[in-house]
Amino acid sequence: MAEGFCRHFLGDVIEPYSAGIEKQVLDPLAVKAMHEIGIHISGQRSKTVDDLGVREFDYVVTLCGHASENCPFFPAGTKVLHQGFDDPPRLAAGSANEEEALIHYRRVRDEIKDYVLTLPFINLTRYNQHD
């Protein structure tokens, strides 16, 4: 979801990549939650940091505790930021149906959006007008 927001709101000023510690299947409920607000992430795929190849990053942003604790080493010039978010699949695990599960995805989606729009490395004044 974070990569989708970054591409949607900031794609003209940053080059976002997302990668995890392990490859996962693209979560269809995350795709649906993002689609509800007009951001299409169905073309994204799960990647690991190794899949990104050799690159230098100005910033690395981790969004879950597991990623923060297991984040690979980045050169000294790379700023690493961490902001933890609840894991929607874990929250939705006991849901009775898809609509009940989507409540969790929507909440976390909206929290991630708010975070992306306040990232410290860019002046987002012009983006705060977006829904």
Image (spheres, rainbow, N blue to C red):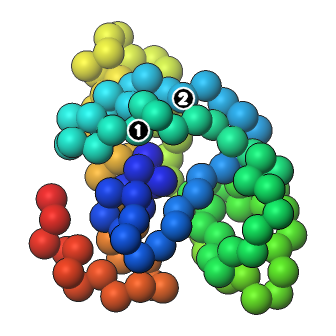
Element type at mark 2? loop
Mark nearer the viewer, 1 or 2: 1
Residue under label 2, please give it: 26
Residue 107 appears in the figure: no
Residue 117 appears in the figure: yes
Crowdedness near tag 2: few (<14), some (14–19) or many (≥20) residues, C-alpha within 10 Å: some
Q: Is residue 36 left or right of residue 15?
A: left
Element type at mark 1? loop
Identity of the residue drawn at 29% across and 21% down: 100
Identity of the residue drawn at 16% across and 65% down: 130
Q: Residue furthest top?
A: 96
Label count reads 2
Q: Position of residue 23 (x, y in %)?
A: 72, 34
Mark 1 and mark 2 residues within 8 Å of each other at the beta carbon: yes
- The quadrant the C terminus occupies is bottom left
Q: Amino acid at mark 1?
A: Ile
Q: Is residue 49 above or below residue 115?
A: above
Q: Is residue 56 left or right of residue 123?
A: right
Q: Earlier in the sequence, mark 1 or mark 2?
A: 2
In front of the other: 78 or 10: 10
Residue 100, labelled with which disc? none
Q: Position of residue 117 (x, y in %)?
A: 33, 71
Crowdedness near tag 1: few (<14), some (14–19) or many (≥20) residues, C-alpha within 10 Å: many
Q: Amino acid at mark 2?
A: Leu
Residue 120 lies in quadrant: bottom left
Q: Position of residue 68 (x, y in %)?
A: 71, 61
Q: Is residue 80 above or below residue 97?
A: below
In front of the other: 106 or 16: 16
Identity of the residue drawn at 32% across and 11% down: 97
Residue under label 1, please give it: 41
Q: Is residue 10 above or below residue 3?
A: below
Identity of the residue drawn at 31% across and 64% down: 9
